[in-house]
Amino acid sequence: MSRTNADTLSEQHKDEILAEIRAGQSVVVGVSRCHVLYSFSGGRWCREDFDEGRTEESELAESDLRSIIASSPSDFRRTLWAPWWRRFGEAFLRQDDVSARGFLEEMRVRRAPTEWLRILGAVLTWPETKPEPDLEQLIREEVQSTGLRSMMMDLAEWRTSESLGRRGMAVMDCLIEMIGPHPRCWEMRADFAQMAGDAVAELADLERELEATPPDAFWYPQVATRASELKRALSTG
C-alpha cells in the first residue's frame, strides 16, 4: 500500500526531528516491556532495544535514523510538534495571544493532535469567531470529562502556579460563554480558582456546580464535601 500524504514527513520536518534528538530529546517506540529508544549521546546516534529486561545497544548512522523516521513517521511526530506545544504554552499562559496563534498554526502544519488545538484556537478567536456545532460538542465532552484540566496542566508542563490558575479561570469563562453552563464546568473553574489562591471564587463556583447538578450525579458528593470544607475554613479563618 502506498503511503498517504498524512503519513509522510518533509525533509525539513525530518531535520527538525533529528535536531530535537541531537539536542537531548529521546524517542521511545513501543511499549514499556518491549520498546526501542533512539537518542544522541557522545556525538553518536544510538539505538537501545529493550525486550523483557534485556537491553541491546547499537550505533546508528544518521542516514539510517532518517530512513527509520521516514518509514514510521507516526512514531516520531510528537518529537516534531512538541517544541511548538511548549512555545504555545508559554505564550498562551502569559496571554501573548498573537504569538500563541502563530505557534498554533505551526502545530497544525506538523499535524499535532487536533482536539486540543481546535479548542485552544476557539478560545483565541472568541468572540470574533463562533465555534461550529461539532466543536461545541467537543468542548462539552471535554468539559464534562474534565479533560480540559489536563489540557491546561499539559500546557504548563504539569507545574501548578497562580498564573496558570488565573488563565484557567479565564479559559473556563470563555468556554462557558461559548456553550453555556454545562455539567462540571463550575467545578473545573473552581479547580483553577483554587490554583490561583482565590478561595472566595472557588467556593462560589462550587456552589454554582451544586445548584446545577442533580444529587445523584457521581461527582455531586465530592463537590458537596469540598464546598462544605471550604466554607468552614473560610468562616474560621
Image: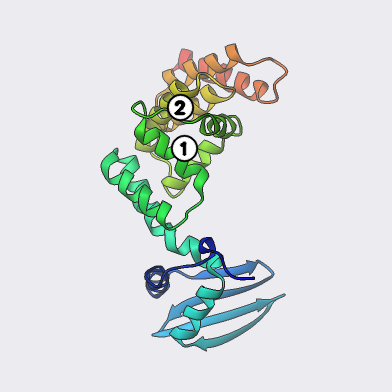
The answer to whether residue 123 shows anywhere in this view is yes
Placement of 69 over or under 161, stated as above or below: below
The answer to whether residue 152 shows anywhere in this view is no
Quadrant of the image for the C terminus?
Answer: top left
Q: Secondary structure at mark 1?
A: helix
In front of the other: 176 or 26: 176
Tell me how the rendering is colored.
Answer: rainbow
As drawn, is 220 to the left or to the right of 62? right
As drawn, is 218 to the left or to the right of 130? right
Cα distance in 3D space between marks 2 and 1: 9 Å
Callout 2–callout 1 Cβ contact below 8 Å: yes
Instruction: Give the amino acid at mark 2.
Output: Leu
CA neighbours of label 1 inside 10 A, class few (<14), some (14 to 19), many (20+):
some
Q: Earlier in the sequence, mark 2 or mark 1?
A: 1
Placement of 56 over or under 211, stated as above or below: below
Residue marked by disc 2: 175
The percent coordinates of residue 86 (x first, y second) are: 38, 53
The percent coordinates of residue 182 (x first, y second) are: 56, 21
Q: What residue sits 42% from the left and 46% below the top?
A: 155
Q: What residue sits 52% from the left and 34% below the top?
A: 135
Residue marked by disc 1: 119
